[in-house]
């Protein structure tokens, strides 16, 4: 797997993060599994314990001609 991530955090609103990520994921044998994904997301973090990510993901399956789009909401608790 290869993943590249770029984030921007505005100095006037430290709880907010904007980001993009691009990844290439494959099995040991590329013929078994090979996908590429591009994500754009907005993260809000509350008191460094709770966070919520709103994400748009565009995925390409290299074994087929099917492209997939997803909207994701990820809730996280850190302890």
Image (spheres, rainbow, N blue to C red):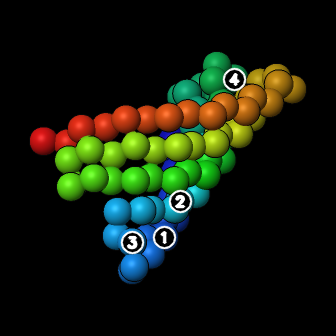
- Say which of marks 4 and 1 sits in front: 1
Q: Earlier in the sequence, mark 2 or mark 4?
A: 2
**Label 3 crowd (10 A; few <14 / some 14-19 / many >=20):** few
The answer to whether mark 4 and mark 1 are in CB contact below 8 A is no
Image coordinates of residue 14 in percent, x first then y, are 34, 70
Q: Which mark is residue 19?
A: 2
Q: Are marks 1 and 2 in contact (CB under 8 Å)?
A: yes
What whole-number distance in Å separates the C-alpha atoms at marks 1 and 2? 6 Å
Query: Which residue occupies the foreground of this view, 46 or 64?
Result: 46
Considering only vertical position in the picture, is 10 above or below 27?
below
At label 4, counting other C-alpha atoms closer than 10 Å, the crowd grade (few under 14, some 14-19, many 20 or more) is: few
- Crowd rating for badge 1 (residues with CA inside 10 Å; few <14, some 14–19, many 20+): few
- The quarter of the picture where residue 65 lies is top right
Please report contact status of discs 2 and 4: CB closer than 8 Å, yes or no: no
Judge left or right: residue 15 versus residue 29. left
- Distance in Å between CA atoms under marks 3 and 1: 11 Å
Q: In what element is the residue under mark 2?
A: strand
Q: For marks 4 and 1, give the CA distance.
A: 36 Å
- For disc 3, the marked residue is 13
Q: Residue at x 55, y 51 (%)?
A: 41
User: How far is mark 2 from mark 4, CA to CA?
Assistant: 31 Å
The residue labelled by disc 1 is 8
- Point out the frontmost of discs 4 and 3: 3
Identified at 21% across, 55% down, the residue is: 47
Task: Say which residue label 4 marks.
Answer: 31
């Amino acid at each position: 797997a290869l993943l590249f991530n770029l984030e921007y955090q505005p100095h006037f609103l430290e709880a907010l993060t904007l980001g993009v990520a691009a990844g290439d994921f494959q099995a040991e044998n590329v013929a078994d599994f090979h996908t590429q994904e591009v994500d754009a997301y907005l993260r809000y973090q509350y008191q460094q314990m709770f966070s919520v990510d709103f994400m748009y993901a565009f995925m390409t399956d290299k074994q087929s001609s099917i492209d997939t789009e997803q909207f994701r909401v990820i809730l996280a608790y850190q302890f």
